Image: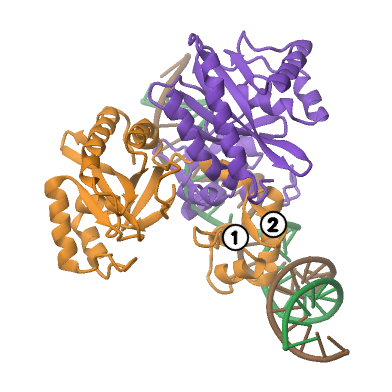
Chain colours: A orange, B purple, C brown, D green
DNA sequence: CGGGGACTTCCGCTGAGGGGAAGGACGGCG
DNA sequence: CGCCGTCCTTCCCCTCAGCGGAAGTCCCCG
């Protein structure tokens, strides 16, 4: 093929994959020109690549001309063993928590300076929240995030406390305050937030810990999101802690998860 | 690029995607040579493509040399709006059914002559079953399958009843018998199976119906899987029916779902 | 009715990529 | 202990797949 020398310089098989990179959680449906722009691919090339990918089933083309991820990538994606073991082991426990609370339950792991939500259960009466399986949210503004941050290496904490994003008017962005909160989380083994990520929602989260020869390790965080006005938030902690301990126990002795 | 003239003749951007085709539910982890063989790609080429895909994050390479689907494809796959609306609307109802029964709950749609499982909830005490989100199981051997088949067009029924696969020794493979069962399913609005897909598991399923101007249309099937020895299977039907009706009602007025 | 933005089709030139060949790295066997 | 079979990796030359500029089509909007 020619031209490749142009801008960017993807080395990955042609630009095909670059085109897929244009799609993300904020941009799940794109028009031809959006894809071309976002991926830095010349329009003509993007046009052909999209057509090929669509023919293969990786993308689907809607009647309005927009492209979106298709069945084939969905299928392939489901085969990815992302935290597979953790999710399988934890799912029943999340259900238990949901049954007990009727609220939205989350399981997240730390990925860099983000909380990656790997499992989620949400009922009809639960508060609507942004998180979905696959979401990555900031560590400093969510319950599970604070729990994960509290056990993260210093350099990660350092990064996370540098210019924390303001998500709502309640987000704690003061470095000292956040540091103090983290200490508190470590001491109590429990994190709380109140409308720091989305208005109307509060959360409680606890660490999921596995005992290793070298000592206990936090491998995930388990949390519930409740309406901000709910007063009995304290009641939720014990339920979470029991579940988290159950998960930790169930994980022990199993393969590694990472 | 050269050689392309070889066997096969993929027209999709190089062979890169062909290589991904080698991965499926039965073969989620493959070695280089397996990929090469399964995709009909020369070993050398497969080697390079896998390396490129791995560098991009589409694939991950395990320490044992096997490749598996990586984080990137997982992310992309989650963006696919496969039955998105149906799943979002139905999830809370599945939770309700699970809460009431403590058994594995499934939501499936028909895809050709297969039942595609689009949502699933499974608790700790539930019977272990093969189905997962993304699984495709035969229509004639599962509860949700029978429900979907009962409302399928004639040619699909025709195909499904031709050489039905034998999954266990209890699978009904006799054409007349299956046809009679379908009639029964239509009449009662309810399907049952007993160890037809996996030993030890029985199931009950009902259709999820949406009222259209042209009349009611079955858009999905809702089912539970229970231990084969459980005697009160009849008790489950009402729960399912209430939930199915709830889903149908919630779906009405919303966009279409294919 | 004319201008502009978005999409589609064409096609010639070229360097990206196909894949044969050869070179490790194991591991089992005689 | 050396030989051979299997699997993975590296090299590199030749070729045509595919890049992308240009021109054409559609449709909306003023």
**Quick check: can you spot residue A178?**
yes
Q: Quadrant of residue C22?
A: top right
Vertical position of residue A230 compared to residue A159: above or below: above
Along the viewing direction, whichever of A15 and D5 lies nearer the viewer: A15
Identify which residue is drawn at 72% across, 51% down: A55
Q: Quadrant of the N terminus of chain B?
A: bottom right
Q: Secondary structure at mark 2?
A: loop
Give percent across and percent down for residue B20. Answer: 59, 44
Number of numbered discs overlaid on the protein picture: 2
Query: Does label 1 or label 2 sit earlier along the sequence?
Result: 1
**Quick check: can you spot residue B43?**
no
Query: Callout 1: 10 Å neighbours few (<14), some, many (20+)?
Result: many
Q: Secondary structure at mark 1?
A: strand
Q: Which mark is residue A29?
A: 1
Q: Which mark is residue A62?
A: 2
Are the residues tagged 1 and 2 within 8 Å (C-beta)?
yes
Q: Quadrant of residue B162?
A: top right
Give percent across and percent down for residue B188. Answer: 68, 20
Give percent across and percent down for residue B239. Answer: 52, 25
Along the viewing direction, whichever of A239 and B4 lies nearer the viewer: A239
Along the viewing direction, whichever of A55 and D5 lies nearer the viewer: A55
Vertical position of residue B67 compared to residue A140: above or below: above
Q: Quadrant of residue B110?
A: top right
Task: Tell me the distance, in whole angstroms, between the alpha carbons under discs 1 and 2.
Answer: 9 Å
Q: Which mark is residue A132?
A: none
Residue B115 vs residue B160: left or right?
left
């Amino acid at each position: 093929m020619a031209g490749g020398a142009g801008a960017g310089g993807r080395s990955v098989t042609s630009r095909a994959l670059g085109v897929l990179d244009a799609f993300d959680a904020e941009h799940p449906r794109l028009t031809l020109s959006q894809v071309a722009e976002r991926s830095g691919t010349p329009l003509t090339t993007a046009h052909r690549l999209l057509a090929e990918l669509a023919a293969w089933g990786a993308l689907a083309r809607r009647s309005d001309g927009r492209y979106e991820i298709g069945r084939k990538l969905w299928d392939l994606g489901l085969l990815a063993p992302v935290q597979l073991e953790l999710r399988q082991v934890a799912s029943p426990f999340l259900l238990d928590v949901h049954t007990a609370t009727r609220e939205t339950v989350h399981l997240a792991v730390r990925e860099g300076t983000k909380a990656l939500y790997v499992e989620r259960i949400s009922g009809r009466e639960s508060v609507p929240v942004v998180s979905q399986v696959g979401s990555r949210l900031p560590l400093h503004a969510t319950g599970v995030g604070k729990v994960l941050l509290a056990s993260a290496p210093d350099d990660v904490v350092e990064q996370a406390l540098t210019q924390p994003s303001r998500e709502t008017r309640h987000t704690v962005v003061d470095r000292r305050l956040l540091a103090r909160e983290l200490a508190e989380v470590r001491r109590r083994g429990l994190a709380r937030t109140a409308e720091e990520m989305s208005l109307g929602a509060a959360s409680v989260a606890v660490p999921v810990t596995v005992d290793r020869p070298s000592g206990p390790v936090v491998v995930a965080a388990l949390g519930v999101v409740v309406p901000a006005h709910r007063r009995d938030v304290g009641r939720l902690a014990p339920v979470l802690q029991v579940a988290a301990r159950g998960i930790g126990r169930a994980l022990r002795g199993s393969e590694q998860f990472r």
